[in-house]
Amino acid sequence: MIFLRLAFKSLWNRRLTTSLTILSIALSSALLLSVSRIKRAAEDGFTQTISQTDLIVGARSGPINLLLYSVFNIGSATNNISWETYQHFKAHPAVDWVIPYSLGDGHRGFRVVGTDDSFFEHYRFRGNQSIQLGEGNRLSGLWDVVLGSDVAKTLNYKLGDKIIVAHGVTSGEGVLKHDDKPFVVSGIMKATGTALDRSVYITLQGLEGLHLDWQNGAMPKESERISPEKIHKEEIKVKTITAFFLRSKSRIDTLRLQREINTYLEEPMLAIIPGVTLSELWRGIGYVEQAFQVISWLVVAVGLVAMLVALLTGLNERRREMSILRALGASSSRIVALLVFESGLLTLVGVAFGFFVQLGAFVILQSWLEHEFGLVLQGSSLTSIEAFYLILTFVAGVLIGLVPALRARSMALKDGLSVRV
Amino acid sequence: MSLIELKNIQFSYSNSKKLTLDIPQLKIEKGERVFVYGPSGCGKSTLLEILAGVLTPQLGQVQVLETDLAKLSDQGRDQFRAAHMGYVFQSFNLIPYLNVEENIELPLHLSATRRSRCSDSKAEISQLCRDLGIFELLQRPVTALSIGQQQRVAVARALLGHPELILADEPTSSLDYDHREKFLQTLFQVCQKAQSTVIFVSHDRSLEKIFDRTLSFNEINKVSGL
C-alpha cells in the first residue's frame, strides 16, 4: 500500500513530465485506434457498396473488371448483353429481381447510368440501406435525370436544371455532346457514402433515345437529327444493356444460377458474387491501410520511447530516493515493482486517455467524415482487435518500465546506498 | 554476546580489483555509542552498508544481533535492516514528495516488527518530534526545512519503532559547529531512551569526546593502513 502511495505521490511530484508522458502515449494510442477504426470504416464502406445483390452479370471479361465498371465506375465494359438475354434471366424462375445497368455516357466527369425503377426499388448497400431521394421524384419521363448527391453538390444543380450528356466518356468534359437532347433534373438522391453518389441516373429508354439518330457510332448530321419532342418513351426499343444486378429467390440458387449464366450458350457472359470479388479487390488495395497501420505502430513506439527517456532521466534524479528506500529496508525487488508500477500506471492512463480522445474525436468528426469522405463509422467503437492493440501497448509500456527498474536495481545492489556520480 | 561481531571481512566493489575493506575483527556491545573516524573516502560508509546488509563482503562473517547476515537471503537482509536498524545519511535523507510526518512513519510501513513496537504511532511520533524539537514541522513539506531540521527528521525516522542499531553516516557534517553538539546531544538522549546502539562515522574528530568509545578506521581496516 505504501508503495502505491509512493508511486502516486512521486508521479504527482513530477506532474509536468508525468502529464507529458501520458499525453504522448495517449496521442499515439489514439492515432493507432483511429487508423484502425478508419480502416474498418473504409473496408466496410468498400465491401458494402453493394449488398443483397447475389450476382453481378456482364459480358464475359474478368471478375474484377466487371466489378470495377459496374459498381465503381472504373474502366469500361468490353461488350454488352442483349436485351433478350436480360429478359430471359429476368423471367427465370429462380430470380427474385434484377436491376439493369447501361453505361457509356457521362456528364462532366460523372458517369451516366441508364436503369429503371427497380434500381430505386431493390438496390441495397451497407446491409439493408436503400436509395432515398432527398428532393424530387424517381425517374418517370424519358428525359428525366436523378443525380447522385456528390454530383448535385459539386455541380450545384437544383431540381429542374437542364443537363447535357456527353457521348462515350465517363471522365472529364466530353467532346461529343448530346446537346440537342437535354435532360431535366427530376430528383436528387441522399448521400449514400458509396460510388452511387458520383453518378447520374436516367432511364434505359432515355439512354437509348440519345443515340436513336446515331448511325454506327457517329454523330448525326444537323439534318438527320431527331428532336427530343418527337421521341416517345413507349416507342423506344432497348437493344442492349451493359450489366445487371441479380437477386435469387434463395441463396441455394445463387451458385446454380451463376453456373447457368457462365455457361449460357446464347451469349458469353460472366456472373460474379460481389462480396467475394469485393474482398479480393480489397486485399489488393488494402495495403495502403496496412501502411498506415504500420506507421501508427511506429508512432506508438515513439510514444513509449519518450516514456523510457522520461523514466530514465527521472531515474538519475531519483537515485537518492531509491537509496533512502533501500536504507529503510525496501528490498530491491520492491523498488523494481515500484518503478514498473509507475510505468504501468503511466501507460494505462495514457492508453485509456487515448481511447477517450479517439472516441471523442470521432463523435465530433463523424458527420464530417461521412459527408466529405463517405466514411460511415458503424459497428462497435472498440473491436476485440483494437482492445488487443491497447493491451499490447500496455504490456509494452510495462516491459519498457522494466528497463529503468532493473537498472535501478543493479545500481542499488552494486553501489550500496551511496550515490556515486 | 556482542551486538555486532565482524570476523575477517574482505570487501571490494565489483568494478575494482583493490580491496576496500579488510577488517580482521570488530566487536561492538549493546548500548555503546561508538565513534568511528577516518579520512573521507576510506570506506567508512562501506562498513556501515555492510553492517546494514546492503552490501555483502566477499569473505568473512558479519553477525548483528546474533544473526549471521550472510545466512539471510537478500530479502531477508532487507527485512532485517527494516526491523532492527535506523540509518541517517550525511544529507538528503528525506523523500522530497512526502511531508515530514509521512517521512517519519515510513519504517512502520516497511517492517511489521517496527510497527508492533509502536502501539500508538501518532503518540510515538509526537513524542519523538517534541524531543527533537520538530513537532511543529510535522505537516510541512520537507523541502521547506533547513538542513538541521531535515537531519532531525531523519533521526526521528531512524528511531521510530525502537530499532536496536542506529547507523549514522556523517550526519553532522552539513551542520555548523554549534548545531553539531546540540544535534548530537539530542540524538544521544533519544537513543538512550530507546536503548539503541549508535555507530557514528565521521572525519571530524572534534566530536569524539562525547562518545563512549572511539575507533580509528585506519586501525580497524588493514587496507587504509597501507
Image (cartoon, coloured by chain):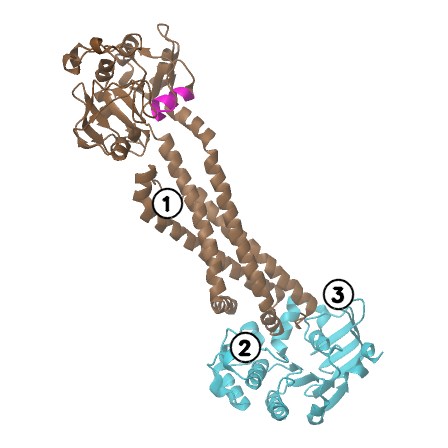
What's the residue type where badge 1 is placed?
Answer: Ser
* Farthest front residue in view: A222
Q: Could you tell me how far apart the alpha carbons at marks 3 and 2 are, in whole angstroms?
A: 35 Å
Say whether residue A334 is visible: no
The shade of chain A is: brown
Q: Residue at x 43, y 43 (%)?
A: A35
Type of secondary structure dominating the magenta stretch: helix
Q: Is residue B182 on the magenta stretch? A: no
What's the residue type where badge 3 is placed?
Answer: Ser
Say what secondary structure mark 2 lies in: helix
The shade of chain B is: cyan
Mark seen at residue B68: none
Taking the image as shown, residue B166 lies to the left or right of residue B22, namely left
Q: Could you tell me residue A63's position as x and y percent?
A: 41, 19
Do the residues marked 2 and 1 share a common chain? no
Range shown magenta:
A64-74
Say what secondary structure mark 1 lies in: loop
Say whether residue A238 is visible: yes
Q: Residue at x 67, y 88 (%)?
A: B31
Q: Nearer the viewer, residue A67 or A326?
A: A67
Mark seen at residue A381: 1
Tag 3, which chain? B
Image marks 1 and 3: residues in contact by CB distance under 8 Å: no
Residue carrying label 3:
B14
> Is A279 placed above or below A362 here?
above
Mark seen at residue B115: 2
Image marks 3 and 2: residues in contact by CB distance under 8 Å: no
